[in-house]
Image (cartoon, rainbow, N blue to C red):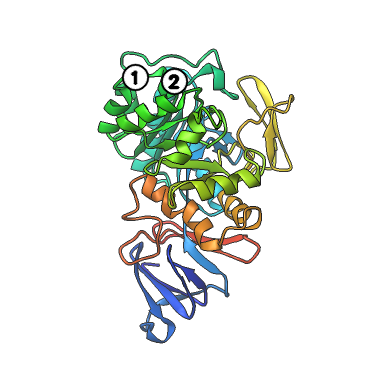
């Protein structure tokens, strides 16, 4: 359909809810939101069946899905499979995420994402390299054998995606002075994660252009009343973004609420940190030679150590409404508009508004995604 209208839906445009209005899409772009009575003739009509129509969800941390782990299948087909698995749960844009790995695997993953964007795999907007330049003290399930200091030509590698966003998670205290500035100046989005840094380390990193924090509270020095740590620095700063895994396992619902209250509005974004189990029948996979199992939505090693998540984006939105008590509009913004702003894509994503890509989801009162569009295509 080059031109169609979605009608009979409760429309959330990214700011406001609308009733008795319809969204007109032409050539993959939102054309207008109009009163039902003002709908022009001749458009194909899609009945929203009274459900909620919202901007598509944007996930900046997706290790896997549909039975595929990016580290194991750094190919266009692997990227496509991960995206297709998450689309069922409302994700219309994502950064496939490579966990700490060797140089050749990093190059393969960057190449695969670049090719996926070139050939038009729907929803792929860049790559997230989570490691390997981390602090082993806060390694989580990342391999201590592969975590390493930055090589002399690391900046060349980390800026080598020609056609999308590159997000790099690193431990700022392990980088030489000026490294974050060099990356930020070249358009890399740098986040602090898997870090044992101090409040001072993070202040210096922010001065150099640190853009955010990967999975707030997890794998970082905690907030204390005398040493705010990375977590405290993250919440105290109004300019940076924080990713939050709202699955009820990574962060207690009460702490989710504290963080959302503490951080400047618009600077918390929901992420899944999803593993291959999302959208897959098999709830087991292997990472670094160790078996990980998802049980009741919790991904863990045999010893109970959390290892990514079995979370999807619409469930994260649902959890923010039901566990935390957020209003639906803010929960949706945390999953769409705010990550779009973090990615510097908020001129085309994160809203249903004229000129924006027609990236939209339709979901029912039980948070089941029933339909989705990326650039106007289902």
Q: Quadrant of the N terminus?
A: bottom left
Res. 67 mark: none
For the point 48% across and 81% down, which residue is it? 20
Mark sitting earlier along the chain (2/1): 2
Point 47% across, 40% down: residue: 235
Circle 2 or circle 1, nearest the eye: 2
Q: Position of residue 5 (x, y in %)?
A: 42, 74
User: In 3D space, how far apart are the residues under numbered discs 2 and 1 (Cα atoms)?
Assistant: 10 Å
- Mark 1 lies on a secondary structure that is helix
Residue 77 seen: no
SS at circle 2: loop
Which of the 4 image quadrants contains residue 15?
bottom left
Q: Answer left or right for 132 relative to 295.
A: left
Disc 2: which residue: 133
Looking at the image, residue 262 lies above or below residue 303:
below
Q: Does residue 8 appear to the left or right of 112 in the view shown?
A: right
- Do labels 2 and 1 touch, CB within 8 Å? yes
Residue receiving disc 1: 154
Q: Residue sitting at 50 percent across and 46 percent down?
A: 262
Q: Is residue 52 above or below residue 233?
A: below
Residue 27, given in percent of the width and then of the height, sits at: 33, 64
Q: Position of residue 140 (x, y in %)?
A: 59, 25
Q: Residue furthest front?
A: 226
């Amino acid at each position: 359909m080059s031109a169609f209208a979605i009608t009979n839906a409760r429309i959330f445009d990214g700011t406001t809810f609308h009733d008795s209005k319809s969204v007109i899409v032409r050539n993959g772009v939102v054309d207008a939101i109009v009163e039902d009575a003002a709908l022009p003739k001749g458009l194909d009509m899609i009945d929203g069946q009274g459900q909620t129509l919202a901007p598509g969800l944007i996930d900046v941390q997706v290790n896997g899905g549909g039975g595929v782990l990016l580290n194991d299948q750094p190919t266009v087909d692997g990227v496509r499979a991960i995206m297709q698995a998450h689309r069922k749960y409302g994700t219309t844009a994502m950064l496939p995420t490579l966990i700490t790995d060797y140089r050749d695997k990093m190059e393969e993953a960057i190449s695969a994402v670049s090719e996926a964007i070139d050939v038009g795999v729907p929803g792929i907007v860049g790559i997230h390299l989570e490691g390997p330049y981390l602090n082993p003290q806060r390694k989580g399930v990342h391999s201590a054998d592969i975590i390493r200091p930055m090589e002399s030509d690391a900046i060349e590698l980390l800026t080598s995606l020609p056609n999308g966003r590159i997000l790099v998670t690193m431990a700022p205290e392990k980088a030489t002075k000026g490294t974050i500035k060099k990356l930020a100046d070249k358009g890399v989005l740098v986040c602090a994660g898997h870090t044992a840094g101090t409040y001072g380390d993070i202040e210096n990193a922010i001065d150099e252009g640190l853009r955010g924090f990967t999975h707030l509270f997890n794998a970082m020095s905690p907030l204390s009343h005398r040493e705010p740590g990375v977590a405290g620095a993250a919440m105290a700063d109004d300019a940076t973004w924080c990713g939050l895994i709202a699955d009820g396992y990574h962060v207690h619902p009460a702490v989710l609420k504290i963080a959302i209250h503490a951080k400047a509005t618009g600077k918390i974004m929901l992420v899944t940190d999803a593993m291959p189990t999302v959208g897959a029948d098999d709830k087991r996979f292997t990472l670094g030679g160790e078996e990980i199992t998802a049980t009741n939505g919790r991904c863990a090693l045999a010893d109970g150590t959390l290892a990514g998540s079995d979370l999807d984006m619409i469930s994260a939105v649902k959890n923010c409404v039901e566990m935390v008590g957020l209003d639906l509009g803010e929960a949706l913004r945390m999953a769409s508009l705010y990550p779009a702003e973090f990615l510097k894509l908020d001129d085309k994503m994160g809203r249903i508004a004229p000129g924006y890509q027609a990236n939209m989801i339709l979901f029912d009162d039980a948070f089941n995604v029933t339909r989705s569009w990326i650039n106007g295509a289902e």
